[in-house]
Image (cartoon, grey):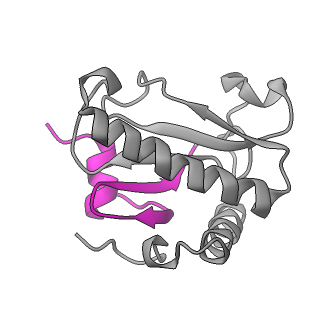
């Protein structure tokens, strides 16, 4: 059965992508804890991170780190938070988001009322920061993803 993330990756459902390579993609969370909250998701459907090949987990974490550095730059955050929870969607995903304190780790603060313009602005800022950091070849444009 195809997950919601597979449907986002395939273009069946919309997503605001910021990164795409042969193993993972990254797109903005529809329930951001802070502006720029991003999910790094393997193209391959794997439910639990503990079931994924170590190389894939390492790659997803490496991409999350690059996105975290870009988030700190783009949003003026003190740090970038990182979490693998896995209960929301049965498809491995790494949460990475700009943080300024431990309060920014509270999942109860996830927003569901984000206007499209704010999502678009966050994606634009994050893509620009990734390009400035030298990752242009992996920055996903707003259009459909390459396979």
Q: Quadrant of residue 78?
A: top right
Lateral position of residue 107 relative to residue 8, left or right? right
Range of the magenta residues? Answer: 1-30
Q: Name the residue located 86 percent from the left edge and 30 percent from the top edge.
A: 101
Q: Quadrant of residue 53?
A: top left
Lateral position of residue 56 relative to residue 132, left or right? left
In the image, is residue 33 above or below residue 39? Answer: above
**Residue 29 visible within the image:** no
- Please state, as top left, top right, bottom left or bottom right, where the N terminus lies in the image: top left
Q: Name the residue located 53 percent from the left edge and 72 percent from the top edge.
A: 135
Where in the figure is residue 96, as x and y percent of width and height?
A: 60, 42
Lateral position of residue 143 relative to residue 3, left or right? right
In the image, is residue 146 above or below residue 112? Answer: below
Magenta run includes residue 22: yes
Q: Nearer the viewer, residue 14 or 99?
A: 99
Furthest residue in direction left, as rendered: 1
Q: Name the residue located 33 percent from the left edge and 46 percent from the top edge.
A: 5
- Please state, as top left, top right, bottom left or bottom right, where the C terminus lies in the image: bottom left
Q: Nearer the viewer, residue 95 or 115?
A: 95
Where in the figure is residue 92, as x and y percent of width and height?
A: 35, 34
Q: Name the residue located 42 percent from the left edge and 21 percent from the top edge.
A: 87
Q: Nearer the viewer, residue 130 or 10?
A: 130
**Residue 28 visible within the image:** yes
Q: Quadrant of residue 14?
A: bottom left
Magenta run includes residue 108: no
């Amino acid at each position: 059965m195809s997950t919601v993330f597979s449907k986002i990756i395939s273009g069946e459902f919309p997503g605001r992508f910021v990164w795409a390579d042969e193993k993972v993609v990254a797109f903005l969370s529809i329930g951001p804890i802070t502006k720029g909250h991003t999910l790094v998701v393997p193209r391959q459907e794997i439910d639990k991170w503990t079931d994924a090949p170590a190389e894939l987990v390492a790659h997803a974490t490496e991409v999350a780190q690059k996105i975290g550095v870009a988030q700190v730059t783009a949003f003026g955050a003190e740090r970038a938070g990182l979490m693998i929870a896995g209960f929301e969607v049965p498809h491995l995903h790494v949460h990475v988001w700009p943080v300024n304190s431990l309060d920014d780790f509270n999942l109860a603060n996830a927003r569901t009322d984000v206007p499209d313009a704010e999502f678009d602005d966050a994606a634009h800022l994050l893509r620009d920061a990734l390009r400035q950091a030298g990752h242009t070849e992996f920055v996903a444009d707003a259009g459909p993803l390459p396979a």
